[in-house]
Image: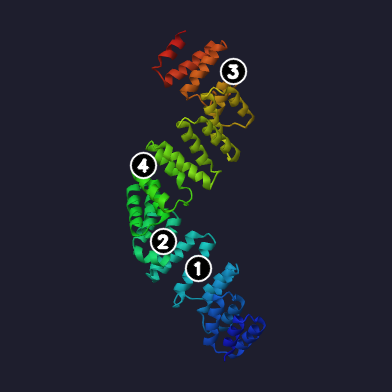
Amino acid sequence: MLNSEKMLTSIQNQDLAHANKYFERALKEDGSDVLLELAEYLESIGFLPQAKRIYLQEREAFPEVNINLAQIAAEDGDIEEAFLYLDAISPDSEDYLSALLVMADLYDMEGLTDVTREKLLEANRISQDPLIIFGLAEIEYELEHYEQAIQTYAKLDNREILELTGVSTYQRIGRAYACLGKFEAAIEFLEKTIEIEYEDEAVFELATILYDQKEYQKANLYFKQLDTMNPDFAGYEYVYGLSLHEEHKTQEALRLVQQGLTKNEFAVNLLLLASQLSYELHDSTQAENYLLKAKKVAEDDEEVLMRLTNLYLEEERFEDVLALENDDIDNLLTKWNVAKAHQALENEEAALAIYEGLASDLQENPEFLQDYAYILREFGYRERARDIAERYLKLVPDDVNMLDFLSE
C-alpha cells in the first residue's frame, strides 16, 4: 500500500499522528501523480498546509499547481502571496484562463470591481463559457452598467444558467430595466421569470414595480400570491398594505400590516401605517397607541412626533401636544403644531415666539402665513401683519377672506 493511501486510512481512523508520519514518507517516496491526487483530496477536506507542501514540491514540474497555491494563500488571507503564484502562469499557458478567473475572484474580494471586470473581459475573449459570461454580467450589474448587463445576460440561456447557478437571467434583466426606469420591460421580464419558476423575490419585485406604476389591482394579485405561498417572506406587508389602501381596502390593509407587526413589532414604518389606517377606520385610540409605540423605538422620531401632534390637535388635546415639547423637535411642521396648541390654550406669547422662529423657513407655506398674519394682528403688529398678508396673497391671490383682512 502506498504511503498516500496509508495516510488517508489514518485520517479516516482519526489517527493524525500516523497520518503525519505517512505523509512525510509520501513526500519522499510516492510518485508525482499520486502526490498531486493526494494534494487535491487534502485541499478538498481542509488539510491546506499539507496540500500546500505537496504543491510547492511539485510546482516546478507542474506549474498549474500555482492556481491551487493561490487559492490556499487566499484562504489564509495572504492575497499578495496569492497574486505572486498567479503571476507565475504566463498568458500562453493553457492554465491562464483558470488563473484569470481566480484573479477576478481575488480582486472582487478586495473590492476592486473595475479590475475584476477587466479580468473577466479578458477571460471572455479566451472562452465563451456561460459561467464566465454570467460572471461578467453580474459585475456589469454591480457596477450599475445596466445596459451592458442586459446585453450580457441576453447572451445566455436562461434555463441553463438557472440550473447551473439558481439565478434567473430574466429576473436580472428585469431588475436592470427597472434601474433604468424602463418599467414596462422590467415587468415583462419579471413575469417571464415567474412563468418559468416561481420565486418569492421575483414576485415581490414585480408586485412592487406594479405598485409604483399605480397598477394597484395587478400588484395586489401578485402580493396575494406571495402572501399565500410564503407568508414568512420578509417585509412585503408594508407595500402590500399601501397598495390595498390605494384600492380603498383599508380594513384588509390594516390586517396585513398587523400581520407584519407580529413578525417585527418594532418596525416603525409598519407602526406608522397601522396608525394611519386605524385613524381612517375611526379608531383614534389604536392610532395613538401605534404612534406611542413607534416613538419608543424610532431612531428618528420626527415623523412620529408630527403625527402625534396632528392627532392631538384634531382631538383638541392641546396639553398633550405641549407635553411633547419636552422632546427635541426639529421638524418645522411639528413646531407649528406646538404653536397652534399654545394659541388654543391662550399662551399667545409662547405661540408668537414659535411663529417668529419659523417665519423664514415657512415663508412659502400659505397656511402658515395665514396663521402668522392673524396672530401678528392680535398683538397689534399691524404693519408686519400687512406684509405677511401681502406675501400670502401672492401665493393665494383669490382668497377673499385674506383680501378682507388686508383691507382692514
Which residue position holds label 1? 103
Q: Which three-letter amino acid code belongs to the residue tagged 4?
A: Tyr
Q: Please state the horizontal and vertical placement of residue 294, each as a whole percent of the image.
A: 56, 38
Which comes before the other along the chain, label 2 or label 1? Answer: 1
Q: Is residue 377 visible?
A: yes
Tell me the crowding category of disc 2: few under 14, some 14 to 19, or many 20 or more residues within 10 angstroms, Cα based.
Answer: some
The residue at the point 57 percent across, 87 percent down is 5
Q: Which mark is residue 216?
A: 4
The residue at the point 62 percent across, 27 percent down is 323
Q: Which mark is residue 345?
A: 3
Task: Left or right? Give the position of 196 relative to 277.
Answer: left
Query: Is label 2 in contact with label 3 (beta carbons under 8 Å)?
Result: no
Q: Which three-letter amino acid code belongs to the residue tagged 3?
A: Leu
Q: SS class of the residue under badge 1?
A: helix
Q: From mark 2 to mark 1, how far is it between C-alphas?
A: 23 Å
The residue at the point 36 percent across, 66 percent down is 160
Residues 258 and 67: in front is: 258
Which comes before the other along the chain, label 4 or label 1? Answer: 1
Q: Please state the horizontal and vertical placement of residue 132, each as a whole percent of the image.
A: 41, 67
Which comes before the other along the chain, label 4 or label 2? Answer: 2
Image-quadrant location for residue 316: top right
Q: From mark 3 to mark 4, how far is it between C-alphas?
A: 44 Å
**In front: mark 2 or mark 3?**
3
Q: From mark 2 to mark 3, how far is it between C-alphas?
A: 63 Å
